[in-house]
Structure formats: C-alpha cells, structure tokens
Image (cartoon, helix red, strand yellow):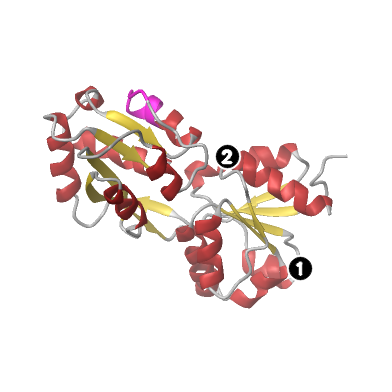
Amino acid sequence: MNALAGTVVIVTRAEHQAAALEGMLQAEGATVYRYPCLAIAPPDNTGPLDDALRAAATGHFDWLALTSTNTVDAVAQRLAALGMHAGTLASLRVAAIGPSTARATEASLGLRVEMVPESFSAVEMAQSFPDISGARILLPQSVLADSEMTRALAHRGAHVTAVAAYQPGMSRGGVDLPALLANGGVDAITLTSGSTAHNLVRRLQSEGGDPRSLRAVCLACIGPNTAQAVESLGLIATVTASQHTLAGLTQALVAYFAQ
C-alpha cells in the first residue's frame, strides 16, 4: 500500500506550479485537491528591476542571485518586455537557491547556474558563494522579501542591489476548502512559502471559513521560513521538511503519516 493512501492533501501552490507537487503526492497514494493561494504579478513599479536588468546587460553586476522559480519567471518576463534577449546576461555568474530554480533558470533564461547551496535557505545560499568580497550582486526578489539575504551577502563584503521583481497576490479556484475543513475532510495542507501561508488564511476568511479549523489538520511546510510564517499566524507547523524541495516536502509528509 502506498504511504499516503486514504489521505486527503491540499496543494496551495499557484495554479501553474501545482502539477509537480500534486504528482509526487499522488504517486504516494494521496488524494490531492488544489486550492491555489498565490498568484504572481509584476510589482507596481517595474522601473528599478528594468534599470537593474539594463545595468546587468552592460556588465554592472558580477552575480545574479535567484531565490525562487517565481523570480526566474519575473526576470524572463521583464527581459521580454524590454526587448532584451536573455543572452545579454550571459556574462553574469548565476546562483540559484535550489535545483528547481536552477532548472527554471536554464530553461527560461538560458543561463548556466554555477552555484546551488546544499541547503535551500537564504542564509545557506549567502554562505555558499565563493569569495564575494567586493562583488556586485543583483538580487531580484518578492516585494515581501525581508532583508535577511541582503544582510548576509553584505556581511561577506558584497555590494548587493535588491530589487522587487514580483508581488504575490490572491488566487481563486480549486476546491471548497471551508466546506471540506468544516466536514473534517482534510488531512494535510502543503505550504511552500510564507506568502502562501498568509494567503491561505486570507482566502479562507474571505470565503467564510474559520482559520482556527486549520489547527485540526497537518500543516506541512517546505522549510523553516514557511514554518515561521505559519506560526506567526497563530497556527502550528506540524511538519517542516528537512530537505527544502517538493520531493523533501512529500517525503516529510510520508514520514509523518507513517507514524
């Protein structure tokens, strides 16, 4: 019998990103429903990102640091809007926070990723760069990103330009989660970012659901930052994956329900 047979799991990723995690969970026997809690949109002002990309094309930066597939998509979209070919960034050394982001970088931007940290967190990524004293690093990120990555890179002597590349918004569609929760029809909800966690609560409330009902299910977080966001909402991060990937999240759920 598959490890998650008989288990109902909710995937909250953006609709265009849900399939990979959904497939992994189904392969373990789970019944999976989608309840997208994130939609990716350009920042209100794309000027700083546009200026940074133009500067990168003229050799102003040494490194491009990419901390999510959403960032990769946002950079690709702005390059297209500016009429710039991704090859204009080929002189940059590129770091990606994890294998999924690295694959997206190579597929969408055509750039070779030089560095991927062993542990997929902002601090670990900053520590995994080679000598960056004096290096100029372009760090596109969410408008909601904190300054942790910037501080960690600056502490190592880098000159960091952090710019807003996208903003997470609310999404729609998927199952009637308030009804499922009210009827005890959910075993676990997967969360792959702090923004997703916050939007889960916001969307649930907007649809007449009770966020307190989330305390009765397993909230499975892809990593410690997501877990912190969950706990800041007064909820319990039941599972936190030690390997901060979709596969790691799936296996963390398998281990939890095996108990």
- Camera sees residue 118: yes
The location of residue 189, given as percent across then percent down, is 64, 58
Secondary structure type for disc 2: helix
Side of 6 where 199 appears, left or right: left
> Which label's residue is closer to the chain start, 1 or 2?
2
Q: Which residue is drawn at 59% across and 42% down?
A: 246
Secondary structure type for disc 1: loop
Residue identified by numbered label 2: 19
49 w.r.t. 20: above or below: below
Q: Does the magenta stretch include residue 70?
A: no
104 w.r.t. 44: above or below: above
Q: Give the range drawn in magenta.
A: 105-112
Q: Where, by quadrant of the figure, is residue 1 drawn? A: top right
Q: Does the magenta stretch include residue 108?
A: yes
Q: Where, by quadrant of the figure, is residue 104 drawn? A: top left
Indicate the quadrant containing the C terminus: top left, top right, bottom left or bottom right: bottom right
> 170 or 147, which is in the foreground?
147
